[in-house]
Image (cartoon, rainbow, N blue to C red):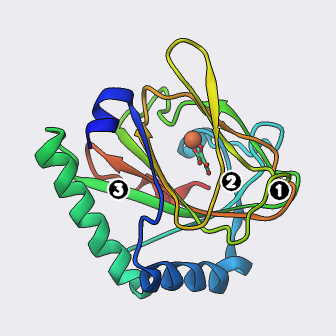
């Protein structure tokens, strides 16, 4: 909590109990055939441009995806913590599973859209067991002074950052790259269901 207040981002390893991690990963694998090519922008603006991003996503829905019940409950706790310790007024979230096939990347961007600015905190959880140097798909985080550093997308690692403040990019993956990505919202939104 202190890190995200001071530095705008935080990287946490071993974020989950093993059991919860295993549940998320097996859910991910069970949905892999239903992923769709991700777009950029919101709603009617939503365009697919694989020059900018090359991932495939599956938007989650708490009611339908009740196999992730333990994850949803953890998320409720995380939101409460942000509200209590960082004085945010988070009241919703939107999450998707993301698959970057080999060759996929995402250019430098911010997670807020021009016409929609309710994404407060970005949360990325990586599911890549046995990731090694050379597999690619590192998350590049840009600091305010323009310097940047790389975060390896290791299994059980969670990265959180302020959606409006931290520019970031996903370097080209040389192997399939799996993650669970989402946004904690200032106001709830159903938009997530309609794009990606
Ligand atoms: O998967 C990641 O490391 C970041 C993904 C991302 O930036 C996004 O989906 O907006
Ligand atoms: Fe992003």
Q: Nearer the viewer, mark 1 or mark 2?
A: 1
Tell me the quarter of the image containing the N terminus: top left
Instruction: Please determine whether, in this image, residue 195 is positioned above or below residue 46.
Output: below
Q: Classify mark 3: helix, strand or loop.
A: strand
Left or right position of 60 against 141: left
Where residue 93 is drawn, which disc sits there? 3
Can you name the residue that lies furthest to the top here?
Answer: 145
Left or right, 74 with reference to 190: left
Q: On residue 38, which mark appears?
A: 2
Q: Is mark 2 within 8 Å of ligand 1?
A: yes
Q: Picture coordinates of residue 177 (x, y %)?
A: 73, 62
**Mark-to-mark CA distance, 1 and 2:** 21 Å
Disc 2 crowd, CA 10 A, few/some/many (<14, 14-19, 20+): many
Measuring from the top left, give residue 64's x and y in whole percent: 42, 82
Location of residue 166 with respect to 175 vertically, above or below: above
Q: What's the distance in space between the residues labelled 2 and 3, CA to CA?
A: 18 Å
Q: Neighbour class for label 1 at 10 Å: few (<14), some, many (≥20)?
A: some
Q: Would you name the residue on which mark 1 appears? A: 135
Q: Quadrant of the C terminus?
A: bottom right
73 left or right of 115? left
Q: Give the residue at x 61% y 68%.
A: 127
Question: Which of the two discs, 1 and 3, sits closer to the camera?
Answer: 1
């Amino acid at each position: 909590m202190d890190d995200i207040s001071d530095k705008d981002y935080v990287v946490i390893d071993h974020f989950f109990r093993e059991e919860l991690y295993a549940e998320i990963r097996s859910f991910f694998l069970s949905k892999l055939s239903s992923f769709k090519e991700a777009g950029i922008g919101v709603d009617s603006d939503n365009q697919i441009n694989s020059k900018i991003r090359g991932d495939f996503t599956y938007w989650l829905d708490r009611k339908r995806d009740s196999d992730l019940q333990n994850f949803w409950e953890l998320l409720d706790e995380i939101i409460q913590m942000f509200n209590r310790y960082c004085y945010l007024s988070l009241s919703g979230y939107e999450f998707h599973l993301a698959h970057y096939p080999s060759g996929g990347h995402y250019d430098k961007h911010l997670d807020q859209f021009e016409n929609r600015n309710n994404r407060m905190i970005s949360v990325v959880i990586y599911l890549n067991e046995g990731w090694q140097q050379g597999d690619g798909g590192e998350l590049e985080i840009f600091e305010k002074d323009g310097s940047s550093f790389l975060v390896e997308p290791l299994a059980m690692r969670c990265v959180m950052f302020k959606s409006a403040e931290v520019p970031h990019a996903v370097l080209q993956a040389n192997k399939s790259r799996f993650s669970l990505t989402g946004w904690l919202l200032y106001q709830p939104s159903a938009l997530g269901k309609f794009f990606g």
